Image (spheres, rainbow, N blue to C red):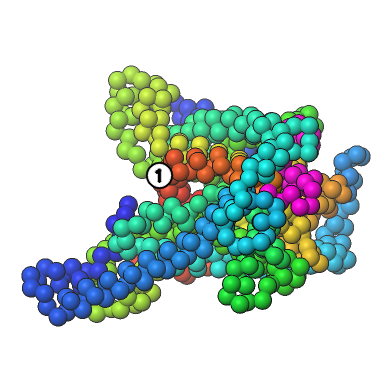
Amino acid sequence: MGGDNKYLGYIYIAPYVAGLLIFTAFPFIASFYLSFTDYDLLSTPKWVGLENYQKLFTRDRTFERSLSVTLIYVFMTVPIKLAFALLIAVILNYRLKAINLFRTAYYVPSILGGSIAIAVLWRYIFAESGLVNMLLGVFGIEPINWFGDPQNALFTITLLRCWQFGSAMVIFLAALQSVDKSLYEAAAIDGASQWQIFRHITLPLITPVIFFNLIMQTVQAFQEFNGPYIITEGGPLKSTYLLPLYIYDKAFKSFDMGYASAIAWVLFVIIMVLTLVAFWSSKKWVYYAGDKRS
Amino acid sequence: MTTSIDFPAAKHAERTAKASPLEIKLRRKRMISSMIRYTVLTVVGLIMLYPLIWLIGASFKTNSEIFASPSFWPENPTLSGYINGWETSTPYTFARFFWNTFLIITPKVIGTAISCTLVAYGFARFDFPGKRILFATVIATLLLPNVVTRIPQYLLFRDIGWLDSFLPLWVPSAMAGDAFFVFMLIQFLRAIPRDMEEAARVDGANTFQTLIYIVVPMLMPAIISVCLFQFMWTMNDFLGPLIYISSVENYPVSLALKLSIDTTEAFDWNQILAMSVLTLAPSLIVFFLAQKYFIEGISTGGVKG
């Protein structure tokens, strides 16, 4: 607001700045420092240089396993979830009378899905004689060993997160509804098919929200904890032992704070590099209104 | 909000008064198309919601019935799951755990609403040195994985003696710590014209009065969205309590439910399912009462979930 003291705004953002310094900036730097130490909570942190990182990348088989499981999980979950969210959003984006009803129904799992209760439910319905296998039995399909088989266990957690596609879908739907209708008319008059319209008009126009959803879902997927902790407890054979579980165990069960910080930093660097790659590549595929490229 | 793609060719055909063969063809095509859409949406919706329906039904089943049929309908409805589950194997009932959750949620939601409104107002309506950099930190925090700050945060709370209290669970949020909400409110504020605020200022109101009497009423729907999301996320939060709360008397419902799984007799499934239903109930009720705010909030700010 013009004419005011130019420092007035600081009064309003003061809580944020204080919180940022105390609860984010300081811990951020401290965790970087801790990753170069050996710290068991009882004594003072002891500087060990790169030892934690050396151990991680050369001698720690659990880390190797956990890292590969995490990458598989993220690269499986995020594309499936987003593709499904976009598909349903496109189907919903039509003159359907019941659009609000469907939107609400699909959104409910997103509200509840992160909770412990739903993880518990997942344990029950994917149990060996649980709901899913009973329903498969109705169609004559042999029961699947969802949690006992390391091949399937991770996928069960992916299914839980894909079940929560609603929030990504609502964002896609909002973007689809804001596409200028005259573009469709023009394309239809030129004889474009529905698929061509989607591929060449709709899709480019919603790339900003695809990009947004991609980043947010990826950052979130890398931090998955509740699902594997409750449903599979990291097993069987560590097939669902995602890095956040490993960090938790190292930090709060073995109280190996220095080592846990090093793992957290590796995870952080992976997320950051992927985010930066996404931002960098976005110049090539994300379309912003008013941009000269088409 | 609910307008969707109009098929322009069809509209064009409607305008040419008489039913031409082309129009009939297009009408039929559109009808088939919406039939397919309704079918797909209904089938997918049923598959998605059936686990929840089954959960509610199964919580009233006897233990022998839970793994006996895929139907959600309890043949011999019983409340034993609720009654025994509520008692828990600890000296406390679930009433205690709900009360604890309430004691975390209330200051967290109120603190979030107040602090995020102040901060968003500061960013959206004032210029000050370093604003660009500070705003960049909001975005950076939004993308910063919590996993990297968690350990030092724990050490910090240990050193100031906050472990096993509710403070670590709500104080950071009450200092606008959830960058996502700050960002969402800034987005809303930017879309609101400043005329009224400027008029109030001309009439002699100071910036704080302007905030309270002009901005907050206009921003109310967005603030309600923030409160609702914070409410649900706190209901669902598990890792925070797992790290900070150690004594059972301070457990919120999420930890208590995990405890029930670990301590309940191997075959008392209905107790766990019943308590799962109860812990989901507050979020479900709030969602159905106020779903308009959820959808608006998520469409404007974009939300994780």
Name which residue lies at 85% across and 57% down: A52
**Residue A10 seen by the camera:** no
What residue span does the magenta drawing correspond to?
Answer: B244-270
Identity, as a three-letter code, of the amino acid under mark 1: Lys
Q: Please provide percent x and percent y for residue A244.
A: 73, 55
Residue at image position (38%, 74%) is A199
Residue A273 included in the magenta stretch of the image: no
Spot the residue most to the front.
B76
Hey, which quadrant is residue B8 in on the image? bottom left
Query: Of helix, strand and loop, which mostly describes the magenta segment?
Result: helix
Residue A293 horizontal/vertical position (percent): 37, 69
Q: How crowded is mark 1: few (under 14 residues within 10 Å), some or many (20 or more)?
A: some
Task: Determine whether A269 is above or below A186 in the image.
Answer: above
- Residue drawn 12% across the image and 78% down it: B20
* Residue holding disc 1: B292
A95 relative to A110 in the view: left or right: left
Q: Where is residue A239 in the image (x, y as percent from the top left)?
A: 76, 66
> Residue B257, can we see it?
yes
- Count all numbered tags in the image, as a single digit: 1
Depth check: A142 or A293 in front? A142
